[in-house]
Image (cartoon, rainbow, N blue to C red):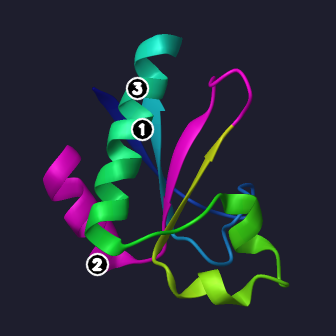
Amino acid sequence: MKLKLEKLDRRHKGNLLFTHRAIVLGLTADRFIDFLTVREWCWDTWGPSCEREIYLNPHYNKVRNNPWAWHYNGDYSECYIYLIGSKELELFTLKWL
């Protein structure tokens, strides 16, 4: 499994709520399977969350107590896990990197 951590700044969507994102790399088929594996671990570790677009929508304030979210596009060329803080980043790093 190939993962890369990226610190979010003003260039990235979600940077006002999330501090980092994990980018799942690799061949397309492998990338999506690896993404699902990491997303399942996040769900089991921190509880349920939602897609980044829903998380960022101000009408869905109920989901904002979750410390993570995800995003992937239709062709799975972009698969991201978003992390809200340093505690989540540290645990994620210990597990996956």
> Real-space Cα distance between discs 3 and 1?
5 Å
Residue that mark 2 sits on: 87
Instruction: Please state the horizontal and vertical placement of residue 44, each as a whole percent of the image.
Output: 28, 63
Label 2: how many Cα within 10 Å (few below 14, some 14–19, many 20+): few
Q: Amino acid at mark 2?
A: Lys
For the residues labelled 2 and 1, say whether their Cβ atoms are less than 8 Å apart: no
Q: Which residues are magenta?
A: 73-97
Q: Is 38 positioned to the left or the right of 66 in the image?
A: left
Q: Measuring 69% from the left and 66% from the top, which residue is drawn there? A: 14
Residue displayed at 34% across by 45% down: 38
Q: Quadrant of residue 92?
A: bottom left
Q: Earlier in the sequence, mark 2 or mark 3?
A: 3
- Compared across the picture, whether 66 is left or right of 97 comes to right
Residue 95 in the image: state x and y as whole percent. 16, 52
Tag 1 secondary structure: helix
Amino acid found under the numbered disc labelled 3: Ile
Q: Is residue 70 above or below residue 79?
A: below
> Mark 2 or 3, which is nearer the eye?
3
Which percent across, then down, holds residue 82? 52, 59
Element assignment for label 2: helix
Check contact, mark 3 vs mark 1: CB within 8 A: yes
Name the residue that disc number 1 marks. 36
The answer to if 75 sits in the magenta stretch is yes
Q: Is residue 89 visible?
A: yes
- The residue pinned by badge 3 equals 33
